[in-house]
Amino acid sequence: ARRTLVLGVPVSGTLQAVNSATVKARVAGELQGLVLREGDSVRAGQEVARIEAVEMQARLRQAQQQASAARAQADISQRQFDNNRALVEQGFISRTALQTSEASLQAAQATYQAAQAGADVARKALADTVLRSPLSGQVTARLAQNGERVGVDTRILEVVDLSRMEVEALLAPLDSVQVRVGQTARLQIEGSSNGAATFSATVARINPSAQAGSRSVPVYLAVDRNAAQNGLPALRQGLFVQGTLETGSANVLAVPLDAVRTDKPAPYVQLVQQGRVVHLNVQTGERSRGDGQTLVAAEGLQEGMQVLTGRVGALPEGTGLALTLIH
């Protein structure tokens, strides 16, 4: 019969969060106050741990005292310059002495500004002893323990935001040319059966470059969690999923895939004509899942022909058949 087949390409990949982050130590020191573990929820900006801050506090006080001393020296140089300028106007000292005083003032002011910058750096280092989560989500890994001395850029926690998830699927070059942004895919969690754990996803991005070697094209599918069927378990990062990406439709003459036999050099189907079996070569095309079976487009047939299903088995041409209509 003539059917409208939904065309698609097979896709598979791993679920991953669109937004994830690693909390790292920005200063070296002893780790304190880490209470979060895998599965705990965190908010953006929430304090998750601290680095022992005694040394940073001492460095900040030192930098502040150095800035105060530099400011006092700059004030002294300013007064000396003002006095020398007045003396030059009165003719008591030479203009060269005034220039020397001005140079000393500029040096003292530069020293004060450098000391202020040093205090800002120390203040920033003290603030960095408090570790905060950059996003809201859940902890997936705890990579350090309280009391451990950590260095700069040591990984402390990994956090993921499961509110937005996507699948990275690698498509063959020929399949990739059929894919467009906005197309829909039906995906299923690996290991599920009878259509359980099925959900939809939409093509959000297509990588403009193929991977070297395999020439596969990465396609990114945004998961639509609202379209999940009843009974779908919580989606987790790292789950492997597979399904079909719909790329269009075609109205063709189709037969069940199991009716096409391949035990001869060319594919063929077994027809019933005038009560006997006839073998007819066909050329298969697009496939689609429908009515609980896989349908395939078959060129060389006419609409309305009677085709034996695959479970009948191979029958020699000319075999007589007695057909019984079951009401």
Image (cartoon, rainbow, N blue to C red):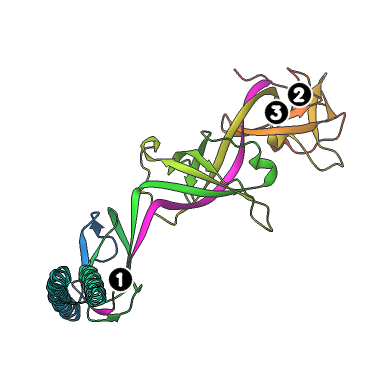
Q: Are marks 1 and 2 in contact (CB under 8 Å)?
A: no
Percent across and percent down for residue 69 are 14, 78
Tell me which residue sits at (43%, 53%) in the image: 16
* Closer mark to the observer between disc 2 and disc 3: 3
User: Magenta span covers which residues?
Assistant: 1-30
Number of dots carrying numbers: 3
* Closer mark to the observer between disc 1 and disc 2: 1
| Label 3 to label 1: alpha-carbon separation | 65 Å
Left/right of residue 163 with respect to residue 282 in the rendered view: left
Which residue extends farthest front? 91
Res 34 visible: no
The answer to which quarter of the image holds residue 25 is: bottom left
Q: Give the position of the C terminus as an image quadrant.
A: top right
Q: Residues within 10 Å of mark 3 (few under 14, many from 20)?
A: many
* Mark found first going from the N terminus, 1 or 2: 1
Helix, strand or loop at label 2? It is loop
Circle 1 residue: 26
> Mark 3 is on which residue type?
Val
Percent across and percent down for residue 200 are 46, 38
* Mark found first going from the N terminus, 3 or 1: 1
> Mark 2 is on which residue type?
Ala
Circle 3 residue: 255
Magenta-drawn stretch, dominant element (helix, strand or loop): strand
The answer to which quarter of the image holds residue 280 is: top right
Left/right of residue 208 with respect to residue 58 in the rendered view: right
Circle 2 residue: 322
Residue 151 image label: none
Assess whether residue 16 is covered by the magenta stretch: yes
Percent across and percent down for residue 291 are 57, 29
